[in-house]
Amino acid sequence: MKILFKNIKELIQVREESIDFVSGKEMSVLPTIKNAYLLVNDGLIEDYGSMDSCPTFKVDQEVDATGKMILPSWCDSHTHIVYAGNREGEFVDRINGLTYEEIANNGGGILNSAKKLQETSEDDLYEQSKKRLEEVIKLGTGAVEIKSGYGLTHDAELKMLRVIKKLKENYTIPIKATFLGAHAVPANYKSNKQDYLDLLINNVIPQVAQENLAQYIDVFCETGYFSVDDTRQILKAGKKYGLIPKIHVNQFTSIDGVQLGVEYNALSVDHLEVMNPEDIEILKNTRTMPVALPSCSYFISIPYTPARQMIDEGLPIALATDFNPGSTPSGNMNFVVATACIKMKMTPEEAINAATINGAYAMGLENKVGSITKGKLANLILTKPINSYGFIPYSFGNHQVEKVYLKGEEF
């Protein structure tokens, strides 16, 4: 099926050559074509250019985009969409003065979600999760990574990953699965964390690999959760089975987890709210993508990733939602882009690059999505009529998404 989008006010993130990601000063460069056309054929981007030079195409459908813009859909490389129930009670606890860490120490937090998930059937978990997935697609997300980590038992972690696999089979959006069994230490292993690590290493990881349930492996490397040595054990075991490393790191403290991520060629290091000069220096000239999660900082009132400093020192940045029931109960990438501009002093160009091409790289999808490039999937956002793409972050409470297309089909 051929679809022609014509009279596009501005076609955004146009890359003639497929690139992996942009860093430093290049993050401020956002190539566009004004008064453009875009041709989609069988779900792929086939051609584009200025309306002045638009050839005559025989197509199945024409979309008149007068006054509207088109950009590649958001690439959300860090979510926990598969979870059970919610934690709105903890939201009130924080308003009443408890910190995220205090709630976790009182049996809330990740352990609270794990208990709910363990008691939820796989079918029910799928039904809850697919609603969230559909919500984020309608908000403009066209590629997503989903992590496990709210099971914290052998069976519950596998249940989560099987739900992710089912979502992958039933929806056309590209989905990457990440095994995050080392998200928190279960209560029954609190006095012997090594036994839990051994369970993950000797039992769960081999089965995840055998059933091909994940592409990535992740660890919450943080004070009070998993140490650098713990993280090393998990990443080493994952790499043995072909799982590519990622790390939750530097959310509350800097404990050399970034250095470990670089050592293990992690595809991404995520959170990074607390960064020291050594953490920034070690990331320079690497292939490891720093991922910032500004809506998490917003929701639980912790510092924001120092993106301005990191970009000014030549690093790339990707943006993601961290959609989860405890610290970020929202998968709205439009809000993430806006918050990055408002609170992290990223320019609209930098934020859009971070939420498209760099986000795609952080999922290993840079050759499929993240830019308007011939041969890539036609996963697109058609905006409402707007004056400029800067209006997208400016209008932070009202998203500017009119329609979303996955493989050229309106969702």
Image (tube, grey):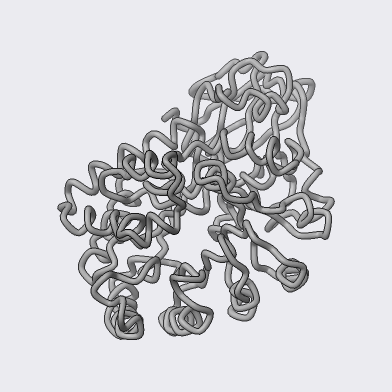
Q: Nearer the viewer, residue 385 or 233?
A: 233
Q: Nearer the viewer, residue 203 or 220?
A: 220
Residue 67 vs 149, above or below: the answer is: above
Q: Residue at x 50, y 82 (%)?
A: 232
Left or right of 328? Residue 13 is right
The image quadrant that residue 298 belongs to is: top right
Residue 63 vs 132, above or below: the answer is: above
**Residue 42 in view, yes or no:** no
Quadrant in which the C terminus is drawn? top left
Residue 214 placed where, x, y %?
A: 38, 66
Residue 319 placed where, x, y %?
A: 61, 48
Residue 149 placed where, x, y %?
A: 35, 62
Q: Residue at x 51, y 71 (%)?
A: 223
Q: Residue at x 33, y 40 (%)?
A: 88
Residue 227 vs 276, above or below: the answer is: below
Residue 378 vs 247, above or below: the answer is: above
The image quadrant that residue 264 belongs to is: bottom right
**Residue 117 in view, yes or no:** yes
Residue 64 placed where, x, y %?
A: 59, 15
Q: Residue at x 70, y 37 (%)?
A: 341
Left or right of 309? Residue 161 is left
Q: How many marks?
A: 0
- In the image, farthest residue toward the front: 97
Q: Nearer the viewer, residue 245 or 108?
A: 108
Q: Nearer the viewer, residue 38 or 209?
A: 209
